[in-house]
Amino acid sequence: MKVKIGNLEISVDTLEELDALVARYGNVASPNADATPATLKKPGDTHPGKAADTVLLKKLVEAGDAGVTTIDVGNILGRRGKAARPALKEWALRIGLTAEENIEPFEDARVGTQRGLRIIKSLQPVAEHILKQQ
């Protein structure tokens, strides 16, 4: 039988061999002290992970008042069209930009001829601080 863990695939003949492998090399998974919800992917999670979070945060901070196109936001978060804005709001909660669901951390922007979103002015320093910590 083959056991696949992430990208690692191990062939074992019996469950006893698998038990022996786990006994010898297995550890109980526990979050690191610096782990955040963005770094802990659970089965069924749909968010893109820490790298995408960092890239999006950097784009939004660097864009400032100009904003980032909703197409770019959607591509990074894995959601398109009307789903991009709610995904961005979930993302803001996940990375700690906002602490409550009822806060709207983004506002509409025009990026050239396209629709876009930008971080509201009052949260821009918070975003910069989060980016420095990463």
Image (cartoon, rainbow, N blue to C red):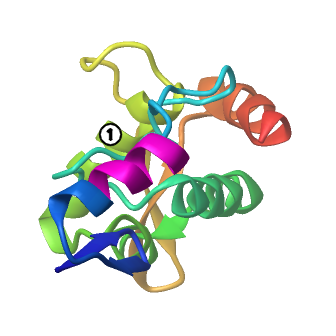
In this rendering, would 39 be left or right of 108?
A: right
80 and 120: which one is in front?
Answer: 80
27 and 21: which one is in front?
Answer: 21
In this rendering, would 129 be left or right of 89?
A: right
Q: In x, y percent, where is residue 33?
A: 67, 20
- Which quarter shows the C terminus? top right
Q: Main secondary structure of the magenta part?
A: helix
Q: In x, y percent, where is residue 62?
A: 76, 59
In this rendering, would 77 be left or right of 62?
A: left
Residue 105 can be seen, yes or no: no
Is 19 included in the stretch rendered in magenta?
Answer: yes
Residue 11 can be seen, yes or no: yes
- Report the number of discs: 1
132 and 123: which one is in front?
Answer: 132
- Which quarter shows the N terminus? bottom left
Element under disc 1: helix
Q: Determine the residue positioned at 43% across, 14% down.
A: 99
Q: In x, y percent, where is residue 43?
A: 21, 50
Question: In the rendered structure, which segment of residues is drawn in magenta?
Answer: 18-25
Above or below, 29 relative to 131: above
Q: In x, y percent, where is residue 58?
A: 70, 57
Q: Which residue is mark 1?
A: 89
Above or below, 98 relative to 89: above
Corner quadrant of residue 76 = bottom left
Above or below, 97 relative to 72: above
Q: Determine the residue positioned at 44% across, 86% down.
A: 113
